[in-house]
Amino acid sequence: MPTYRLQTSGCGRIPRRSFLADLGMGFTGLALGAMLHRDGFAHDASTWLPPDGRPHLAPKAKSVIWLFMIGGVSHLESFDPKPMLNRYAGKSIAETPFRNVLDKKYLEENVRTAAPDLRKILSKIYPMQVGYSKRGESGIEVSDWWPHVGGCVDDLAVIRSMWTNDIDHGAQLQFHTGRNKLDGFFPTIGSWVHYGLGTLNENLPQFVVMGNPVADCCGGQESHRANYLGPQHDGVGLVADPTNPLAYGRPPQGVFREEQQAEFDLLERLNRLALAEYPDDPKALARIKSYELAFRMQRAIPEVFEFQQETAATQKLYGLDDEKAPPFAKHCLAARRLVERGVRFVQVYHGGNGNAGGWDAHGNLRGNHAANCAQVDKPIAALIHDLMQRGMLDETLVVWATEFGRSPGTEGLDGRDHHPFGFSVWMAGGGVKRGVVHGATDELGFQAVENRHYVTDIHATVLHQLGLDSRRLEIPGRKRLEMEHGQVIREILA
């Protein structure tokens, strides 16, 4: 347990408020913030209070599983294969029918970001580094590095026309907040969901984060924080380890749960005695509830990661029967178990490496993407299949995303550069159409040319499916830009 410095008053006595505020019970602060706001004790009378489970419109989904690949997955070797890359391999862009992308007028009209030296990154067309095929009844093209997800393609809505305006890895933060890193920090999509909807389970956090997060260079913890909405709406980081899923998530070493229960009972009795003396102190009552919530979380969170409760068939589905199963497989199974228990938003990172991200393939793209895809392909497909067989996919929106794509031209000998001009994401479940492709890039995969979507269009669609209107979530004094709200991608909605 951490050491706490208690404020004292005359005669060495501890004021009741300081005692309640400073006596740490692990992650009580998180629980307290949630309880204060949920009970309406910590808001200004002029501030709109989020609906407690009452959305603005009829929801199509209850929960979101947000799978984010850090570093920039090549759309060309995943969900937007381009055979023209093979046809013009080794040629400069000027030697192809697509030479107009270097024209000043084209750039002014189409490139909505700080334009790099396109002559450099398109100096030599780089062929596809893996094969592809049409998969499922829908015939959607998927690269051979995604055989398991390809088998689920009839359940996906693939969006091939995303764009962003940060050409560096600050785009990771931008994908989660809708704002450029240079603008500062803003609430993330998970925090808006947390802010706008009440909990479905009083024993668990409403917004959970798993996997190595975005590095400090590219937004860091701000990629799952709430900023001006308040820390009670931050994502809560969990580890797929039932023995220690969260710092102080279990009773202190050497303390039996029965002992801790007795401590909580005593504290509650003392607090209620104080309440009898000060009946008009709602914050004290909220603090009592927060301790109760903290204790319930200590019991509920470790149980989420006790995967031995799952059948052998389910563990095999995710690949957990293999001792070498990647951590991402555990995160995907945990994500299903969390939404099954009522968690609203589960954000799962892959590729966090303390730098720009594991998918950042400036060199050796073939080796990089083959290895990374092998870690995530089977678990993601298992997650979709598992949700479906349990009847949960219709009410769970799964989002697969990355900050940008990779360039059609080569970088160095065998890599691709950052590419914000056109890339792919996909969604599944939660009221989204199945087996469809929306939007398109040109024949080289350079530019989104059909039904273009800025990254916050994903946010708008997620909120809409949960029954939320971002404009009605605004708080006084915090007017948001139009681009932050985005536009719902209605063409992919069932």
Image (cartoon, grey):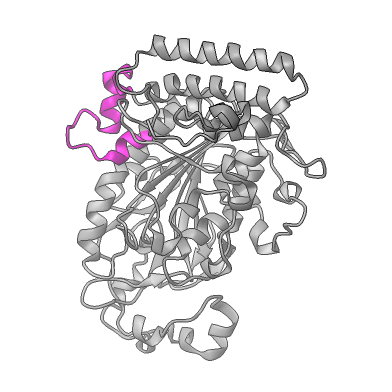
Name the residue located 31 percent from the left edge and 78 percent from the top edge. 125
**What residue span does the magenta drawing correspond to?**
306-332
Q: Is residue 428 above or below residue 88?
A: above
Considering depth in this image, is 187 or 296 the residue closer to the camera? 296
In the image shown, does 87 or 481 lie closer to the viewer?
481
**Residue 113: % across, % down:** 53, 76
Residue 298 in percent (x, y) is at: 43, 22
- Could you tell me which quadrant the N terminus lies in? top left
Magenta-drawn stretch contains 317? yes
Residue 331 seen: yes
| Quadrant into which the C terminus falls | top right
> Is 135 covered by the magenta stretch?
no
In the figure, is residue 112 to the left or right of 85? right
- Residue 157: tell me if it is visible: no
In the depicted structure, whether residue 253 falls above or below residue 326: above
Q: Quadrant location of residue 211?
A: top left
Q: In this rendered view, identify the residue nearer to me: 403 or 254.
A: 254
Residue closer to the observer: 454 or 212: 212
Q: Is residue 27 above or below residue 226?
A: above
Rendered residue at 70%/37% (across/down): 42
Q: How many marks?
A: 0
- Tell me: 248 left or right of 22: left
Q: Position of residue 127 (x, y in %)?
A: 27, 71
Q: Residue furthest right?
A: 46
Name the spot of residue 400 as percent of width and height, x first: 44, 48
